[in-house]
Image (tube, helix red, strand yellow):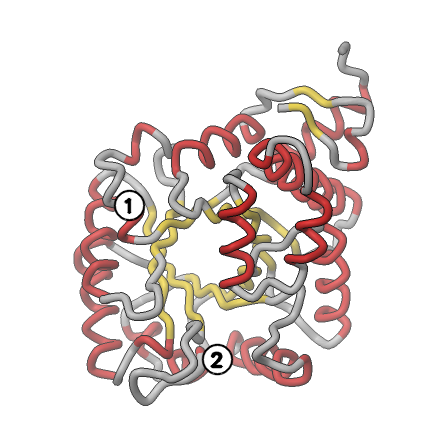
Amino acid sequence: MLETIDDASVKQQIIDFLQDVSISITPDAAERFSDFRKYVKPETSVFIGLLPGGDYREVVKTSARLHKQGFRVVPHFTARNIPNQSTLEDYLNSVCETAAVDEVLVLAGDVATPVGEYHCSMQLLETGLFDKYGIKRIGVAGHPEGSPDIGVEELNRALAQKNAFASQTNAEMYILTQFCFDAADIIAWEKQINAAGNRLPICAGIAGPMELGALLRIATKCKIGDSIRMMARLAGGLAKSKTMQTSDQIIAGLASHRARTPETKIQRAHVFTFGNLSNATRWIYSMADGEFSLNDNAQNGDLFL
């Protein structure tokens, strides 16, 4: 179809929203790709996950390799996987020395029983070690759909504590959200937390394209509250294309919201690759580079890629 002026505006909103897109991968998944430069643009921020039961030294090893290939590495620091301050400092010192790390993602961690003395992200932040090692940016978790393990009041209290801590650290802090399946849920959540006093910018987590069944298993494991509604939405047809279409809609919806709402704190996107690095980066860069066209419902978030 011929692109109209309105189409051009919508398309540019999407391109602008994705200019600083980051991705995530685990050390195990990263081992399958010897050279990330074949798939990922230079200087992209690549988040390296520390999974439950994982060894932080594997994160250090992966971080060093990707740093040498020209990427900005952002390791996860998950409180419930770190036994004590000595281990925390060794982990932090190692990634800073071997991968020039200046940004981290600090999380509680999804294990029922902590391996040591830490059980929440604030305990890691309050050690002062991130300032000691010159960390410039710190991401913390956001839960637009809530959490079955943490009540709303506790989530709100934790976010208020992180906002207060932001004025005490030398680092810039931001929120990275859990992946969701509807832009409206993220926008409504942002409105709610901002009304409660949030001042931190928001990076929206988005699921990369993958087979439907696998995504549902991950959503269930991650305890995403909207899994059942997503299942109904994506039922029928080719699972992979349906999943990709839904992620397209989220990006389009958030890009439009960002363009229309100057005061929004939703600034950029982060793609969870779930190990599908080549598919995820091909998909996201096609949009970031403007290599897509819009259908007649583009302003509602439906794209043809």
The residue sitting at 44% across, 44% down in the picture is 273
Percent position (x, y) of residue 109? 42, 73
Identity of the residue furthest to the top in this view? 2
Q: Can you say whether 22 is above or below 237 in the image?
A: below
Q: Can you say whether 293 is above or below 146 in the image?
A: above
Res. 240 image quadrant:
top right
Left or right of 17, for residue 71: left
The residue sitting at 46% across, 29% down in the picture is 282
- What amino acid is at disc 2? Gln
The residue sitting at 52% across, 74% down in the picture is 166
Percent position (x, y) of residue 74? 36, 56
Task: Decide which of tag 1 and tag 2 comes sooner along the chain.
Answer: 1
Element assignment for label 1: helix
Circles 1, 2 touching at the beta carbon (< 8 Å): no
- What amino acid is at disc 1? Ala
| CA distance separating discs 1 and 2 | 35 Å
- Of tags 1 and 2, which is closer to the observer? 1
**Circle 2 is placed at which residue position?**
168
**Circle 1 is placed at which residue position?**
30
Res. 263 image quadrant:
bottom right
Left or right of 173, for residue 300: right
